[in-house]
Image (tube, grey):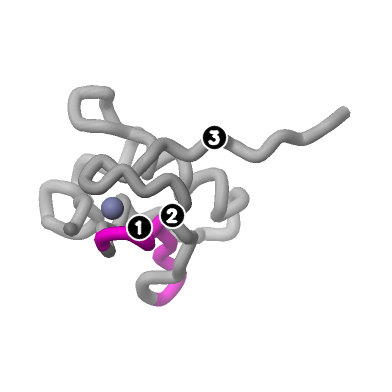
Amino acid sequence: MTHHPLPIKPCPFCGDTDPAIDEISSDDWALCCNGCGAIGPYYHDDGSSEVGPKAIELWNRRPGEGLPAGISEALNTGDGTYRP
Ligand SMILES: [Zn+2]
């Protein structure tokens, strides 16, 4: 069975299609746009799943599409919002 990488949506700000996965702070991972420097919502690595796919899942979310449990709180505190 072939494992295809998850599709990554273009940056909502500049349209760049090749964001990089970076560790933003200790165990907090996010996709970062190479075009404009926008940072996607953080995924906190608690060891329960693969970091890459989770960070991509968060990056791919757009306003109005809903967020997974635990993430809305982070957005409300300003930690994990998209930052141009
Ligand atoms: Zn961008």
Residue 15 is situated, as x and y percent measured from the top left of the image, at 31, 43
What is the magenta range? 26-36
Residue 69 is left or right of residue 82, and the answer is right
- Are discs 1 and 2 less than 8 Å apart at CB? yes
Q: Assign a secondary structure to mark 3.
A: loop
Q: Amino acid at mark 1?
A: Cys
Q: Earlier in the sequence, mark 2 or mark 3?
A: 3
Residue farthest along the right direction in this orientation:
1
Residue shown at the point (44%, 70%) measured from the top left: 23
Location of the N terminus (image quadrant): top right
Residue type highlighted by circle 2: Pro
Q: How many marks?
A: 3
Residue with the mark numbered 2: 19
Q: Which mark is residue 7?
A: 3
Q: Is mark 1 within 8 Å of ligand 1?
A: yes
Report how far apart the C-alphas of labels 2 and 3 lie in the structure: 11 Å
